[in-house]
Image (spheres, rainbow, N blue to C red):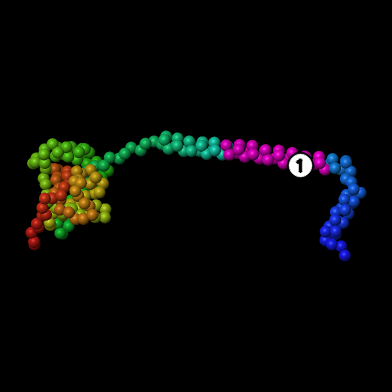
Amino acid sequence: MNRPDQFEQQLQQQYQHDKARHVLPAQVKNALLKQARQNQARQRHKAGWLCRNGWQGLWRNTQLALCCALLLLLGYLLQPVQPHSPLYYQISYSQDEAYRQVQHHVASNIRPQRQSNALAQAQQQYRLSGEQSRAFYAQTGLLQQQQDHWQIKVCDELLLTIDKQLLRQIDLSADITPQFAQWVEFTSDAAGLLIAIKPAAAPLHCSQG
């Protein structure tokens, strides 16, 4: 019985014998080699074309994106500037059973009879007067912040509401804390325009009844 290594040796000998008997003709061998070289050349050409066209496509896409961004920027810069609508100080009045007088101070787009810079002029005069001029009237009230406005209560004499947009134009002390009710001294001019609001030195004692 043959051993495994002897069997493998016999197979090798048989393979070499068959290979020697069936030699590949030179013409066929050359044709196969030529075909293989042509396939390799086509693969290299295809890879080079894809590489070149891939970079060209990327460059074209980049140029297109830059052009679009530039057009958007130019469109934004060339938009006509909308004129800013000025705001004017307006005072209106209403009725309330709990107060003798109710005033509403707002910043409005409607131009009043007075000049639009009336508040700025009054504030400048107030500062120059040293806060002692008879043209200004100081009162004490309880300041509270509401959802869409501020209000000042002067016992049952006066309820004064202030638009938040207007409040930014009034001389407001840095000591005012909007989160809590606070006693304040508020100053108005002869026309009733609010000039300044600052913390009061003492609370206002309202009479009962």
- Residue at 9% across, 40% down: 133
**Residue ranking furthest to the right:** 21
Does 191 sit left or right of 163 as displayed?
left
The answer to which quarter of the image holds residue 89 is: top left
For the image, the number of numbered tags is 1
Per the picture, the main secondary structure of the magenta-coloured stretch is: helix
- Residues in magenta? 32-59
The answer to which quarter of the image holds residue 6 is: bottom right
> Which residue is at the front of the view, 109 or 200?
200
Question: Is residue 123 visible from the viewing direction of this image?
Answer: yes
Which quadrant, please, contains the N terminus? Answer: bottom right
- Residue at 12% across, 57% down: 156
The answer to which quarter of the image holds residue 120 is: top left
Give yes or no for residue 34 being in the magenta stretch: yes
In the rendered image, the vertical position of residue 24 relative to residue 74, given as above or below: below
Which quadrant, please, contains the C terminus? Answer: bottom left
Give yes or no for residue 5 being in the magenta stretch: no
Label 1 element class: helix
Q: Position of residue 78 (x, y in %)?
A: 42, 34
| Residue on which the image places disc 1 | 39
> Amino acid type of disc 1?
Asn
Determine crowd level at label 1: few under 14, some 14-19, many 20+ residues with C-alpha closer than 10 A: few
**Residue ranking furthest to the bottom:** 1
- Residue at 82% across, 43% down: 32
Does 91 sit left or right of 62 as displayed?
left
- Residue at 17% across, 54% down: 182
Question: Is residue 194 visible from the viewing direction of this image?
Answer: no
Q: Position of residue 61 (x, y in %)?
A: 56, 39
> Which residue is at the front of the view, 36 or 209?
36
> Which residue is at the front of the view, 199 or 146?
199
Q: Position of residue 44 (x, y in %)?
A: 71, 39
Q: Position of residue 128 (x, y in %)?
A: 13, 36
